[in-house]
Amino acid sequence: MFVIVTVNFLCGFFLMNALWIPPKNLINIYRLTVWFTLGSMSIGELHDDVETWGTEKRRETPISNEYR
């Protein structure tokens, strides 16, 4: 049991050190920017969907199936 716990901590330690290496190029920054932009757009759409659920506004302008 002690060996399993020790190996688990060592794997976490080495993984933590491997992930904390600073990037050598700007592709990671661009990739994260795209992910956060798309994420914020989807959160905005989800908020609008929840706010208009079952209201008269939703009945007047339903969401088409091409976006779902």
Image (tube, rainbow, N blue to C red):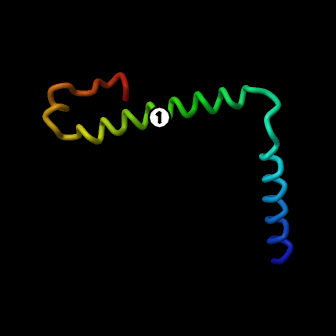
Pinpoint residue 35: horizontal percent, then vertical percent.
57, 32
Q: Secondary structure at mark 1?
A: helix
Q: Which residue position holds label 1?
A: 40
Pinpoint residue 43: horizontal percent, then vertical percent.
42, 37
Residue 37, placed above or below residue 47: above
Q: Which quarter shows the C terminus? A: top left
Residue at horizontal 26 percent and vertical 40 percent from the top: 51
Report which quarter residue 61 is drawn in.
top left
Describe residue 10's horizontal placement relative to residue 34 as left or right. Answer: right
Q: Which quarter shows the N terminus? A: bottom right
Pinpoint residue 63: horizontal percent, then vertical percent.
27, 27
Residue at horizontal 85 percent and vertical 62 percent from the top: 10
Pinpoint residue 26: horizontal percent, then vertical percent.
74, 26
> In front here: 33 or 18?
33
Residue at horizontal 79 percent and vertical 65 percent from the top: 8
Residue type indicated by callout 1:
Ser
Residue 41, placed above or below residue 19: above
Describe residue 58's horizontal placement relative to residue 27 as left or right. Answer: left
Mark 1 neighbour class, 10 Å CA radius: few under 14, some 14 to 19, many 20 or more: few
Describe residue 52's horizontal placement relative to residue 44 as left or right. Answer: left
> In front here: 55 or 24?
24
Residue 66, placed above or below residue 23: above
Report which quarter residue 12 is drawn in.
bottom right
Please tell me how many numbered marks the rendered image carries.
1
Report which quarter residue 13 is drawn in.
bottom right
